[in-house]
Amino acid sequence: MSLLSASGISKQYNGLAALSDVSFDVPSGQVRALIGPNGAGKTTLVGVLSGRIPPSSGSVHFAGQDVTTWPAHKRISQGMGYTFQITSIFADLSVRENVALAARRHQKSAAVVDAMVEEALLKTGLWDRVDDIAGTLSYGHQRLLEIAMGLAQTPKLLILDEPTQGLTEGDVEAFKRLIKSLRGEITVLLIEHNMDVVMQLADVITVLEAGRVLFEGIPTDVKANALVRAAYLGGGDAET
Amino acid sequence: MTTDLKKSVILHAGVVLALFVLQFVLPAYHHGNMARIMVLASYAIGYNLLFGYTGLLSLGHALFFAAGLYGAGLAMSQFGLSAGPALVIGVVAGVVIGAVVGGLALRTEGVAFMIVTLMFAQAGYLTILYFGAYTRGDEGFVIAQTERVLFGVDLSAPLVRYFAAFSLFCAAILTCFLAVKSRFGRVLVAIRENEERAAMLGYDVAKYKLGAVVLSAGLSALAGAGYALLFGYVGASFASVQYSIFPLLWVLLGGAGTVLGPLVGTVFMFYLIDLSSGLTTAYMLIAGLVLVVLTVFAPQGVMGEVRRRMWRWLP
């Protein structure tokens, strides 16, 4: 059964269609990538899925429940973890407290929270920075902190919005190792520009273009698909 | 217990102990002042929970202080209740009004929140004047000394009054300390730091903010009710906009978002006005100047600076 399922999602902004009739399913345990050129509607779609943007029509089901009308915090409390595209951390709080806030929402015991903080920071390689003030971390480390906060929520589904944006090559490698190590533990929805990352990590790729699902398939098929190549290589005639 | 927690427990217990000992050494004049300051500082502690920890700037807290003041005062003057039940009624009045005003005002944010809370407080102030037949309006009313008796002791006797004010202050600072150290308080700080992120960690931000308003209003009302019982005067000036600005000033001076800041700020401001008015009739000029200097050189308030420079662990 699919963990996350969107059916017939449309979203108009002042008459402009950002999304038109987008449907897709993410089965439990899968690493799904969502790609598409700029303006394809990725950010809007993720906003609709996470509850930050209400859709104009269509419905979202998560873990067996219709969550279309749920506010974001309620979806998250039901196991949908979300990391921001533009780093959004508690800059004046310590790294420890940032992650602890993520863990504490679903976990009452202080000892368990401490253990989860340690685990999430070890996985993301930030453990030696645990007492630093989050705002003093480098940009790449702040991106990793975002992911650590996502992990500490022990979500059923982890939505990563452009996680490697602005990371150095070394950080990207670390990120790829991290996601590979999570394979099977949690379901991941990865919104990503870096095709190398997508091809290596994703089980299935959904390609959006101009607010529609252009193609969906395993990485090798996506690579081979003429429409996708056209969309990505800038061939304007691919759409028609 | 972590060392940081130990340090902060020792510091706060030390301050409380010092306040307790002060009553035996202070001369009569300062003795009376400190009793008043501790009640007002309790009010500031209530304000600080919302402003300093949750990051919500209210300009209408006089409404909550007055709810406690009038809740207790009217319960005694109009319904002949004794001091104990009157105190409870004062606090309940503050909590109920806090829930209603919070529920409505929290639909707004930022400047609009300031305006809406200010508006509610003004409505409260005018309501007090409107029902002048019971409240005696601006003039206010006095609660007779014979009625200000709690658990068989006369609250108007200086030593008792000091001790009662001290107890009230202890209750307020303990509530604040526990709240700040609790899961609830940490979420409030998270909301102050980054509200959107707090929501996207799955916290029901609206619920927490309402909780903060209600707790803050309840503490403010407790201080108001205590004020009525200890000093025996209930007047509309306590509901005026001035009394909404005072706690903001006290907290800013002492250090917003610190447990001890409200006490430090209240003592500082009280004695600043007290001392400067002994020097000149233009005492507000001196007070104003000192305030400007302090905001320029210690924008985080006294305890905020202490935390920044020396004690990072200060809650």
Image (cartoon, coloured by chain):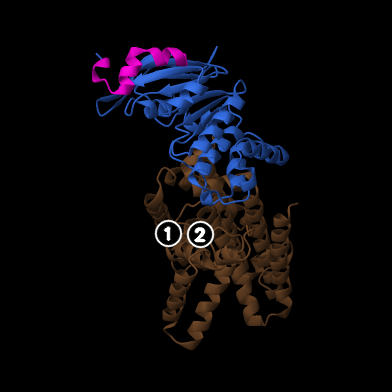
**How packed is label 2: few (under 14 Cα within 10 Å), some, or many (20 or more)?**
many
Contact, CB < 8 Å: mark 2 with mark 1?
yes
- Magenta portion: prevailing SS class: helix
Residue B228 visible in the picture:
no
Residues in magenta, as a range: A218-239
Taking the spot 41% from the left edge, 29% from the top edge, the residue there is A193
Label annotation for residue B66: 2
The chain letter of the brown chain reads B
The image shows residue B240, relative to residue B157, as above or below, that is above
Q: Residue B42: x, y in percent?
A: 60, 62
Q: Residue A181: x, y in percent?
A: 61, 26
Quadrant into which the C terminus of chain B falls: bottom right
Q: Which residue is mark 1?
A: B125
The first of marks 2 and 1 along the sequence is 2
Give the camera-side residue of A197 and B195.
A197
Quarter location, residue A231: top left
Q: Residue A83: x, y in percent?
A: 50, 34
The local secondary structure at tag 1 comes to: helix
Q: Amino acid at mark 1?
A: Tyr
Give the colour in which the image draws chain A: blue
- The chain holding disc 1 is B
Give the camera-side residue of A77 and A32.
A32
Q: How many marks?
A: 2
Answer with left or right where residue A38 lies relative to residue B286.
Answer: left
The local secondary structure at tag 2 comes to: helix
